[in-house]
Every structure is written in structure tokens, then in C-alpha cells.
Image: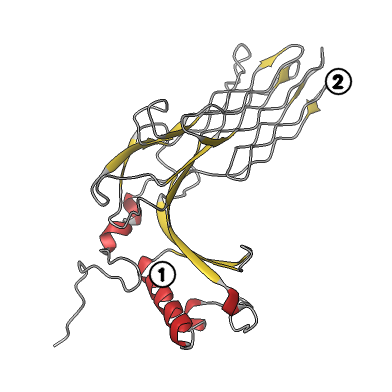
């Protein structure tokens, strides 16, 4: 007689036992963004030196594999048992270096990425292992589009989206309590109609609310680029979202020449490391003036459970 494991039985040695259906959603049912990226939950471990320097980072897409890794690591650290490097494809020089390994500290987190659908309210159900006292939620609003090219006028780039974050968000009953959120859509492409070449605003992002103003944390969208004769300013970067911790999206480049034609780059998105950079400015009055866009951090809505 062959006895197979119960698929509905919660599994976990180091992590809190959890049924597979709670953390893994079949791929065909997952919404995807315009690049084909799915909403997904991944599992991260980092090794740091005592000064905080990160020596390596590992990512797992399977929670049970991640749990097995942590169990092997705990045994290795506690009783000195051999660590199965080959099993986990670990060939970093940190492993096996006796002068470094004793000084390493480890942290791990469950990271949920929500990238789609955009532009409408969605519902997030908290997982049963959500830690109300150790988590971080990050979000970025949608960037705006630039104006449509014109051979005789100035057209400017759109602004980048704002970034916002909140720590230790509390669900009343983890595993049951839900939160409403929205992921800001990117600004739609500009119309090529000569009478309306302006770009389009991006969309705001928020978490735990039905509107940005009424949410726990929100981020405001970038503002559209514009077109016209003479000096034109780039679209403003997103700023002023609800909540206490934000960085600002970069603005589109300004074209301040009194005459001529050309286009400016868009502003970069804000991120956890700082504001997005502005698109390049130009005061030239020549023909076909072009400036570069601003750099920024890519992003989505991320939930870290630490």
C-alpha cells in the first residue's frame, strides 16, 4: 500500500505551517500587467555582516523549499551539520569561508508583489502568517505620458509617480481580514490629433481604503506632459499622497526656449532610496531639441512580512 501525503495538511518546520493553496495561486488565474508580470508571493533571505553590509540575497518561489532551506541553515548554525550547498544551488564564496560565516546574520521576509490589474479597487486577503508587528507596505503611483511629437512646437515629458511606505500595518484577524487597494495605471499614450497632443495623467495608488485620500497609505500620480509654441514646462512629479513617509516623482523636462521645436524626457519614478530624477531641461531655440528622461526606481505595490 502506498500512502501519499495529504495535500491539505499545513506544512512547515521553521515557518508557520500553512496550506499550499493559501500562498500559491494557479498561474492561469493570476492577473498580469502589460509586460506579462503576475501578482506573486516570493520568499527572501539575506546574509549580512555585523556592519550591515549584505553579502548575498536568495529568493525562493516555493514556500516549502524556502522552509527546507531555513531548516538546513538552522541545523548548520546550531550543531555544525554540513549545509547542502549543491541542493540549493549555493556557490557564493561566503559559504565555506570560515573567516566570514561566523559573523553573518540572517533575515528573511515574505514579499508579495501586486502589479495588476491597474486603475480599479481590488481586495487583498491577509495571509494567516501575517505579522502585525513586523511588516512593510510599499507602493508607487503611475507615471504620466508625455505629449505627442510635433514638428513645429515644444512637447514635454510627463512626471514620475510618487512612492509611499508604511510599517507595521495591522490586520484585525490575519488570514481573514481584507484590505482594499488600487494600483495606479500608467498614463495612456498621447493623442496624435494636432489639436490635442497633450499626454495623460497617471493614476494614484493606495492601500487600505476605497480612495487615495481615505487610505492608510497612498501615492499620487505624475502629471501629463504638454505641447505648445514657446516655453513649455514638463509634467509635475507625483507628491502629497496620504500617509507620512514618501518620496517625490521627478518632473518632466522643461523647454524654455522662446521659439523652436523639440521634446523633453519624462521624470523618473520615486522609490525607497530617494526622489525620482527630473527629465532634462533645455533653453535652446533651435529645431528638434531633445533632452533625456530622468532615472528612477521601478516599482509596484509590495508587502513585506518580516
Residue shown at 17% from the left, 85% from the top: 2
Residue shown at 53% from the left, 44% from the top: 299
Disc 1 crowd rating (10 Å Cα; few below 14, some 14-19, many 20+) is: many
Q: Earlier in the sequence, mark 2 or mark 1?
A: 1
Residue shown at 70% from the left, 35% from the top: 293
Q: Residue 218 location in percent, x, y?
A: 46, 33
- Residue situated in front as seen by the camera: 79 or 191: 79
136 over 288 or under it: above or below: below
20 over 295 or under it: above or below: below
Q: Say which residue label 2 marks.
A: 286
Is the Cβ of the residue at disc 2 closer than 8 Å to that at disc 1? no
* Quadrant (top left/top right/bottom left/bottom right) for the N terminus: bottom left
**Mark closer to the observer (2, 1):** 1
Tag 2 secondary structure: loop
Q: Is residue 135 left or right of residue 298?
A: left
Q: Residue 228 location in percent, x, y?
A: 70, 13
* Quadrant (top left/top right/bottom left/bottom right) for the C terminus: bottom left
Q: Is residue 19 left or right of residue 169?
A: left
Tag 1 secondary structure: helix
Question: Could you say which disc has been placed on residue 281 in the image?
Answer: none
Q: Say which residue label 1 marks.
A: 66
Residue shown at 31% from the left, 50% from the top: 29
Residue lying at the far left of the rendered structure:
1
61 over 235 or under it: above or below: below
Q: Residue 158 location in percent, x, y?
A: 62, 27
- Residue situated in front as seen by the camera: 65 or 209: 209
Amino acid at each position: 500500500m502506498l500512502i501519499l501525503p495529504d495535500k491539505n495538511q499545513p506544512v512547515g518546520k521553521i515557518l508557520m505551517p500553512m496550506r499550499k493553496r493559501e500562498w500559491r495561486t494557479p498561474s492561469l488565474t493570476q492577473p498580469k500587467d502589460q509586460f506579462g508580470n503576475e501578482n506573486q508571493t516570493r520568499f527572501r533571505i539575506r546574509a549580512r555582516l555585523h556592519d550591515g553590509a549584505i553579502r548575498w540575497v536568495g529568493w525562493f518561489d516555493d514556500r516549502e523549499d524556502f522552509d527546507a532551506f531555513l531548516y538546513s541553515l538552522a541545523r548548520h548554525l546550531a550543531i555544525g551539520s554540513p549545509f547542502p550547498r549543491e541542493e540549493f544551488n549555493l556557490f557564493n564564496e561566503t559559504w565555506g569561508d570560515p573567516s566570514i560565516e561566523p559573523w553573518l546574520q540572517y533575515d528573511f521576509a515574505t514579499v508579495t508583489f501586486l502589479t495588476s490589474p491597474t486603475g480599479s479597487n481590488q481586495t487583498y486577503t491577509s495571509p494567516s502568517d501575517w505579522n502585525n508587528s513586523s511588516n512593510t507596505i510599499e507602493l508607487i503611483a503611475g507615471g504620466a505620458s508625455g505629449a505627442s511629437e510635433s514638428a513645429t512646437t515644444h512637447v514635454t515629458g510627463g512626471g514620475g509617480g510618487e512612492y509611499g511606505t508604511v510599517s507595521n500595518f495591522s490586520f484585525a484577524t490575519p488570514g481573514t481580514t481584507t484590505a482594499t487597494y488600487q494600483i495606479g495605471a500608467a498614463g495612456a499614450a498621447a493623442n496624435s490629433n494636432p489639436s490635442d497632443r497633450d499626454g495623460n495623467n497617471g493614476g494614484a495608488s493606495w492601500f487600505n481604503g476605497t480612495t487615495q485620500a481615505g487610505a492608510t497609505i497612498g501615492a499620487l500620480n505624475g502629471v501629463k506632459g504638454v505641447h505648445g509654441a514657446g516655453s513649455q514646462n514638463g509634467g509635475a512629479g507625483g507628491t502629497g499622497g496620504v500617509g507620512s513617509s514618501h518620496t517625490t516623482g521627478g518632473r518632466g523636462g522643461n523647454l524654455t526656449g522662446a521659439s523652436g521645436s523639440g521634446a523633453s524626457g519624462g521624470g523618473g519614478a520615486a522609490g525607497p532610496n530617494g526622489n525620482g530624477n527630473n527629465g532634462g531641461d533645455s533653453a535652446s531655440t533651435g529645431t528638434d531639441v531633445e533632452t533625456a528622461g530622468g532615472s528612477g526606481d521601478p516599482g509596484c505595490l509590495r508587502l513585506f512580512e518580516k
